[in-house]
Image (spheres, grey):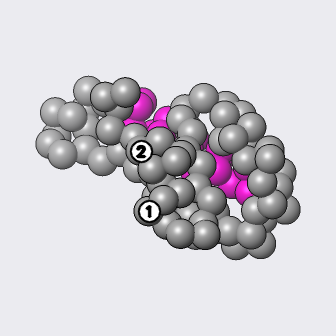
């Protein structure tokens, strides 16, 4: 799709018995919905946006905060909603 995100089937093949889901953390509830059909033991959250230059930091501050803080909050909410034992 050109987004750079791997599809669920491609990710599942690359991780053996692990079941991976992807979601846009900027869309409230999307991750929780993506996990609804799963029994969740662990969530590994590695999504982040970083500023590569001072200009990017200045011009994209709200996006950086939204993704990094809001995305982490969204992932923690999904972990809580699914009684996840581990959050990394």
In the image, is 36 to the left or to the right of 70?
A: right
Q: Please, what is the dominant secondary structure of the magenta stretch?
A: helix
Residue 69 lies in magenta, yes or no? yes
How far from the left and from the top, in percent, is residue 43? 63, 63
* Frontmost residue, 56 versus 39: 39
Secondary structure found at label 2: loop
Residue 15 lies in magenta, yes or no? no
Q: Is residue 36 visible?
A: yes
Nearer to us of marks 1 and 2 is: 1
How far from the left and from the top, in percent, is residue 11? 48, 54
**Which residue is located at x 69 percent, y 41 percent?**
34
**Which residue is located at x 18 percent, y 45 percent?**
52
Tags 1 and 2 touching, CB below 8 Å: yes
**Which residue is located at x 59 percent, y 49 percent?**
21
Q: Which residue is mark 2?
A: 6
C-alpha separation, residue under disc 1 versus residue under disc 2: 10 Å
**Which residue is located at x 48 percent, y 59 percent?**
13
Q: Quadrant of residue 18?
A: bottom right
Q: Quadrant of residue 79?
A: bottom right
Q: Which residue is mark 1?
A: 14
53 relative to 16, above or below: above
6 relative to 59, above or below: below
Q: Is residue 68 visible?
A: no
User: What's drawn in magenta, residue-wise?
Assistant: 61-79
* Frontmost residue, 17 versus 2: 17
Secondary structure found at label 1: helix
How far from the left and from the top, in percent, is residue 31? 66, 41
């Amino acid at each position: 799709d050109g987004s750079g995100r791997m599809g669920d089937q491609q990710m599942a093949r690359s991780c053996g018995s692990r079941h991976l889901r992807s979601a846009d953390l900027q869309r409230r509830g999307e991750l929780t919905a993506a996990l609804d059909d799963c029994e969740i033991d662990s969530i590994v959250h590695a999504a982040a946006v970083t500023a590569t230059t001072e200009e990017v930091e200045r011009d994209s501050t709200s996006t950086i905060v939204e993704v990094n803080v809001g995305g982490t909050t969204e992932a923690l909410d999904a972990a809580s909603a699914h009684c996840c034992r581990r959050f990394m």
